[in-house]
Image: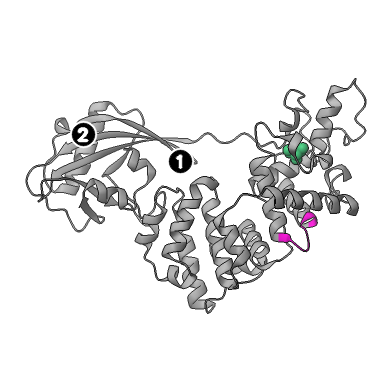
Amino acid sequence: APAPPPARHLFSDPAEIEALRGNLLSWYDRCKRDLPWRALAATEPDADRRGYAVWVSEIMLQQTQVATVIDYYNRWMQKWPTLQALAQASLEEVNELWAGLGYYSRGKRLQEAARKVVSELAGRMPRTAEDLQKLLPGVGRYTAGAIASISYGQATGVVDGNVIRVLCRLRCIGADSSSLAVIDQLWDMANVLVDRSRPGDFNQALMELGATVCVPKAPLCGECPVKQHCQARRRKLLGKSPPVPDVEDCGVGDCPLCPPATEPWDSSLGVTNFPRKAAKKPPRVMRTATCVLERRGCHGALEYLIVQRPSSGLLAGLWEFPSLPLAQNLQEKKEREVLADHLQAWLGQPVAAKGLRFIGEVIHIFSHIHQTYVVYSLLLDGDVTLDPALSPSRWVTEDEFHASAVSTAMKKV
Ligand code: SF4
């Protein structure tokens, strides 16, 4: 069995744990942000609806800023106030409301899971983190812990990006924070720390601290309610004194939670020495040709052709202008030709590569893809019959386009 981590990286003193909980919770009571899902979770008597509201907010908050989520959350809860209402929605409606929020599979999975709760669990949300994770598709360890602690008062910890940062700083954990060994350690720590009588508030407080005080670049240590428990801060302050041996240092080079010997503490970084991550893989570079096909509709207004993407993979089920991934390093002339061929298949009529008007390039960064859209346009005259054997397609006005389930990238295009 691996050796237990050195004590300096753990919380083992009950008095310290109690003090940290108290300090954090009283700060949270004073400073917490007013968020609609918090209000609902605190006042809603129906436990299933509480769980549903927290679930929706947590899925939306994955990879998305709170300020952006509030409006989406309010519209969602207005349209589908209960699990039962969501279970009856179509995927098209879900995608339309989700449009612009990114990571579209989240909305789809949320709706599939709601259907499962209604059809297989008699509309009753599982009440523990273990059951939530086991029974609900798309609900991972973090979301399960958040729903169970916030909605049902289960004393279970949570670990998200904010919690990782705070805990790594509190306990000077400098090993790769995305490694399994560190993540396991942080979950254990979160479960030890979580307040037994106010677990939901405690978890939200720890996340809120990471989001508003212990921020990635310039943390506000002077205002931090848990600064007296923070080893990174202590280490930083020590660094200002004349050199003294750091009695808290772990054994040289073999501590699984310390920074690697090759990247020791950098005094110019202070507390932002923690957390550390292994270098990210560079995003995949992609080029896609896309064509805004226009025609005059029967009332004279311009209409645009949009087509639906396949139901799995990137941007599954969303609508876009006819698009075609390009091989790297194609000459511009060749790009036009392959795009013209592609459009020909849609329109069932010859499209001259020369007739495509180059508009410009649009760059959009997905989490793991650096995408460049090479944008062309083509005004069609005469009637066009779209081939029903191909993916669904339709003509839309500009307003209809914006109300459709289209990605942010396509809106930029
Ligand atoms: Fe983060 Fe600074 Fe607070 Fe430590 S003292 S937890 S580094 S904000």
- Residue drawn 70% across and 57% down? 201
Q: Is residue 2 above or below residue 122?
A: above
- The mark found on residue 337 in the picture is 2
Q: Main secondary structure of the magenta part?
A: loop
| Left or right: 324 in relation to 39 | left
Q: Is residue 242 above or below residue 264?
A: above
| Left or right: 317 in relation to 249 | left
Residue lying at the far left of the rendered structure? 382
Binning the other alpha carbons within 10 Å of mark 1 as few (below 14), some (14 to 19) or many (20 upward) gives: some
Q: Are marks 2 and 1 in contact (CB under 8 Å)?
A: no
The front one of 212 and 366 is 212
| Left or right: 137 in relation to 295 | right
Q: Quadrant of the C terminus?
A: top left
Question: Residue 322, percent across and down?
Answer: 26, 44
Magenta highlight range:
192-199
Magenta span includes 194: yes
Q: Kindly report which numbered mark, 2 or 1, lies closer to the viewer in this rendering.
A: 1
Residue lying at the far front of the rendered structure? 30
| Amino acid bearing label 1 | Phe
- The mark found on residue 366 in the picture is 1
